Image (cartoon, helix red, strand yellow):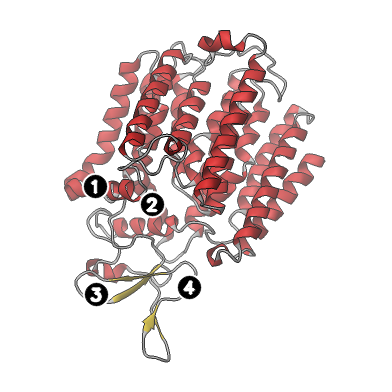
Amino acid sequence: MITALLLGVSAAVTAVSITALPYYDFPTGGPALALFTLALWLLFGLAFFVLRRVPLRAAVILIVAGSVAIGGAAMAGPPNTSTDSARYAWDGIVQNAGISPYKYVPTSPHLEKLRTDWLFPAPVVGADGIARCEGSRIQTSHEPGTNTIVCTAINRPTVHTIYPPSSELLFAGIRLLTGPAPQYWPMQLAGLLMSLGITIMLLLGLRARGLDPRWAALWGWCPLVATEAITNSHVDTLGALLLLGATLLVSSPRVVGGRPWWGGIALGAAIAAKLIPVIGAPALLRRRPWKIILASAATFLVLYVPYILTSGVKVLGYLPGYLSEEGYDDGTRFALLTVFVHGTAALVLAGILLLIVAILVWRRSDPANPWLGQVVMIGATLLIVSPRYPWYALLLVPMIAMSRRWEWLAIPLALTARTLDPHLAVTRTGELIAVVIIVVVSFHRAGPGAFGRLGGFFRHPLTANRGAITSE
């Protein structure tokens, strides 16, 4: 009863935070949204803590019901901290018109006939006779060549799309079913369905390995999932879904040696969703790596070939420009590293650290239990790279649930704090606190002599405290 009540309150607070708080009028709505976000994380932690006393069958029902309730509440309004799903919709509309999404920028006159009112509202002419773009999510741009004013909900409307083929196929499929008229809810619904799919996969995956399925609540009820997978409907959810599937297949306890071919196909599709899931590969390559590499590479190429044939090098889209814009080309993006080094030196140091972590994860991950290796690889990458956006952590949360290493949730929380207050000091403080929490809890779990057992860091017994939600 208490757990259900907490989940109901979480759903209500989620809906209010989306419908009543004007984030785009920041700083007016920013502080209130920060307080609501903090409340949601506290409710999440309390509900998860109380769940350990709920009988297993009832707990599974609550996990699924809570995922549906909170996820449904997350659809109460349009995206509140991101406009990326406007680009998703546009790419789908363009593809269903038989045009490659990589061929033209959104403001191109070649695509004028495809423009919908909600993505491209008409300018408003003021009393002074000047046309202006109005709306909290609407940007002012200009049509290439004619310089005509264009109002659009799409961010970066003068550059080509950045999204890889798996994502583009998803966008096209959604708009094929709904048409161009519906606004944000189709992608939000897709995010909800993918999120529920991950919850079910976690429940089944944990149960198949003799582990407590209650840990699936770390994904199903997580405020990050509600906000970024559903409300803002980031396509990173697709990458998380496919990477989780790949890891479950490769480490399948029902098949000796797992299913490397199928796992490799899922991994290739995940990488073709947003490239970032490639960091999940090292933990999967300890056993029969050539099968996984071959299957993933072939899948990646098969997905890309049709777009390459129609668009050539334009399939790279805005990726080079994006990396430069985010400060990854000169090393200015790395929040923690730039305390010690700057510029190119920070970029080189980041590369070295990522390589070391990847090698350690590859060498030390247990092929039958790669979850902690996944957590370390993805979590360390997020801390080293310091992305501005919390939705990159969607890739991490399912692996936290499977590994039962709840302390790593400090990373998504730190990235969320960065979104609400983007100052560098907040970023560094949040990430440093996350590092301290992870290190302290990890050594506490390891017990006396932990320093002498660092070599076994990536391995833990499946049989230890299976039934206790507080184990591991």
Query: How far apart are labels 2 and 3 at the CA level?
Result: 29 Å
Foreground label between 2 and 4:
4
Question: Which label's residue is closer to the chain start, 1 or 3?
Answer: 3
Residue 4 drawn at (x, y percent): 77, 43
Of residues 171 and 222, the one drawn nearer to the viewer in this rendering: 222
Query: How far apart are labels 4 and 3 at the CA level?
Result: 21 Å
The answer to the question of whether label 4 and label 1 lie on touching residues, with beta carbons closer than 8 A, is no
Q: Which residue is mark 2?
A: 171
Q: Amino acid at mark 2?
A: Phe
Q: Amino acid at mark 4?
A: Gly
Query: How far apart are labels 4 and 1 at the CA level?
Result: 31 Å
In this rendering, would 167 be left or right of 408?
left
Query: How far apart are labels 1 and 3 at the CA level?
Result: 26 Å
Question: Which label's residue is closer to the chain start, 2 or 4?
Answer: 4
Vertical order, 124 against 288 (above or below): below
Of residues 252 and 103, the one drawn nearer to the viewer in this rendering: 103
Question: Which label's residue is closer to the chain start, 2 or 3?
Answer: 3
Of residues 93 and 107, the one drawn nearer to the viewer in this rendering: 107
Q: Which residue is mark 1?
A: 315
In this rendering, would 10 be left or right of 289?
right
Q: Which residue is mark 3?
A: 147
The answer to the question of whether label 1 and label 2 lie on touching residues, with beta carbons closer than 8 A, is no
Query: Circle 3 — which element?
Result: loop
